[in-house]
Amino acid sequence: MTTRREFLAGAGLEALAAQLPVIALAQPKDSVTIAMTLEPPTLDPTSGAAQAIREVTLQNIFEGLVRMDRTGKIVPCLAESWEVAADNLTYRFKLRTNATFHDGTPFTSELVKFSFERAVAPDSTNAQRQLFAPIAAIETPDPVTVVITLKQPTANFLYGLAWGDAVIVAPASAANNKTSPVGTGPFRFVRWNRGDRLELARNDAYWGAKPALAKATFRFISDPAAQVASLRAGDVDAQTNLAAPEAVAQLKADPKLKVAFGKTEGEVILATNNAKPPFNDLRVRQAIAHVLDRKTIALGVYGFDVDLIGSHFSPLHPAYVDLTNTYPPDLAKAKALLAQAGHPNGFTCTLRLPPPAYARRAGEIIAALLAQVGINARIEPLEFPQWLERVFRGKDFDLSVIAHTEPLDIGNYARDDYYFQYRNPEFKALIAKIDVTLPEAERNALYGEAQRILARDAVNGFLFVLPKITVTAAGLEGMWTDWPLPITPLAEVVWR
Amino acid sequence: MIEAAIPEPTARRHWWTSPSFLIGAALTLTVVATALLSYVWTPHHPTQMAILNRLKPPSSANWFGTDQFGRDVFSMIMVGARNSLAVGLGAVGFGMVLGTTLGLLAAMRRDGLLDNAIMRSADFTHAFPAVLTAIMITAAAGPGMLNAVIAIGVLNLPYFARLARGSALQVWTRDFIQAARGHGLSNWQITLRHVLPNIAGIITVQATIQFALAVLAEAGLSYLGLGTQPPNPSWGRMLNEAQTFMAVQPWLAVFPGAAIAVTVLGFNLLGDGLRDALDPRVRRAR
């Protein structure tokens, strides 16, 4: 016998069940699939240099004491606050009390000491060990305080702590981080299907603001045509940096998609062997600088305007100085300079190009531009291992085209043994001074000076910064569109 | 008596009226004429860039449109013809001269150590897939037009060596060779005066067909970036570069693709036509 109450209860349940799908549809979507070009070789940012490791793990799975925000500013992360002593040698970090690792391990000061000591241990494969070189001692007076003493004042110490190489790991999980990473971040690792995808899920025990997304998937699509097809078909919700700039017009015309052009720290240069004749002659380098019409080169490579540079510095950094007019395009002047240098009819040299499309295309345009003043640059395409072996390590080249993607890497010009072999004591002294100058305004002024010296000496042909072309589904917001660090944090990504 | 036994060098029928010969000759002549014309005239400079004029569709100013650097595609196709033919000529010439010489030598020393050495080497080279071997050679020796010529030439070697040996062996069994020997001619003299002229026709036919394959192989190597180097225009590289623009500017791929197709078809048909004319076996079969 069915009583009236039972009947009503059953009807109510049925009604509820019928409504459920409707409710699910009305709620905002809380999962996302993001495509990137390269797959990380491992998932441990403290184990190798591959940028793709950082792109997926930093600020998602792993966190450091500090982090970089989307504008390039250093903000608190696992360290809630910090004080720097007057001598600029002692940093006292106050740590978060409510942070835990995904496996439940509580975050304490001991783990900071463990992580930084592990990074410089003899068996460490950390790609940026020099970040920790200035450290003299790490003390842990209590579980929420870390005191780091430096050997000498180091201006970019905190900046380095925001990098993927300085994330905090726990002793119990550190050894397995390459394949099943355990960190303190807003997302935890779920599954990695090599060659295809990496799945993350929201860390519900996160110490900070809860991410809007419950589930996030990174897919690895290296073929430019496949990237475009996946975006248009809706198979992926975003592409962190589109590898097919020629498809931009097509994607922009698609109402389901948004295209954003951003800046990166990747300075593209015509690398010049400063130790090899005739490029050791300033007048020859100046002549080349007068030939390089950056606007034309960038347009030929991308088909749209990108940010041009006149020195080795990204416009993303507050210390950037616009020096693009140091040697404006002027063929007559270039010819005159070549004649003064003893090459009135130009000369023949090699232009060794690595595989990326930006390098091959820019190289072909540059060869055509140089031919206008009689410089016959013979193009030699190289595979990346060959390029690293011959050009980068062997310094066996005249000219090359390459992007320098590390943030704030102008200091490389102070290294005598660096592949373009620029040797300038004045510049070296300036970089040494920058390293110990902590007040930001003062330091930025010195960075400006350093940019001017490099532009004046026409050390390399300074061309443009690699653009970041972020393509997202129309309703997806919060993706990084600039790359002060090439990473894709998901904590602020949300569907509208 | 000797004369009567040698197949006549010219055909009895009007072989030059066969459609495959006519079409093949017309296509080949067009390509060769285009290549020759490119030395004295192209509508635009083939490597002159005009970035602001990039990726334009075909028009009266640029008959085949412009590429990603604003270069005139028609002029590039013209100069590309020159490069394709040069590589084909060099590679087939290399393979033909060396391969035929080795084949004749092997036939002269039939079943000897030299014969075995030559033919087993030819078998060895032949055993590898042709284009893969060319890729291997250019990858090892470095990319470039000359290395492409050598790589494709090496692949042509066994074809000519085998063909020359087989055909020469047939000639060696003829009565007039015995007669020549009776006249006191040495092996070398017989090879040069009687064997070579008798196999010249069949070698020419093979060369024409190998030429088509060489053009195709060159396009393949250039497509992979191992052949003709920029800024020198090459059909294969134009195809490769056009690939990224397929969705936006498809004609960029159409023109170099058509150029390769026309050239390969032309030489193949010409080879067929010549074989009908010069190969005694085919003629007898009619």
Image (tube, coloured by chain):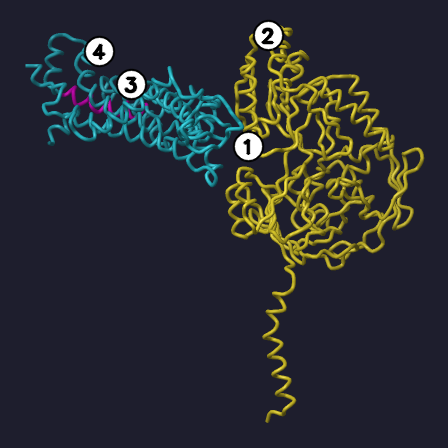
Chain colours: A yellow, B cyan
Q: Are marks 1 and 3 on the same chain?
A: no
Mark 2: which secondary structure?
loop
Are tags 4 and 3 found on a single chain? yes
Chain designation of label 4? B
Q: Residue at x 54, y 24 (%)?
A: A365
Please give the residue where the numbered disc 3 appears in the rendered image.
B102
Q: Do labels 4 and 3 touch, CB within 8 Å? A: no
> Is B161 inside the magenta-drawn segment?
yes
Local packing at callout 4 (Cα closer than 10 Å; few below 14, some 14-19, many 20+) is few
- Please indicate, yes or no, whether residue A277 appears anywhere in the rendered image: yes
Q: How far across and down, in percent of the image, does residue A171 sit?
A: 77, 48
Rounded to the nearest angstrom, the CA distance separating label 4 from label 1 is 56 Å
* Residue lying farthest to the right in this orientation: A86
* Left or right: A264 in relation to B2: right
Q: Which residues are magenta?
A: B157-173
Question: Which residue has dot 2 on it?
Answer: A343
Q: Quadrant of residue A113?
A: top right
- Tag 4 and tag 2, C-beta contact below 8 Å: no
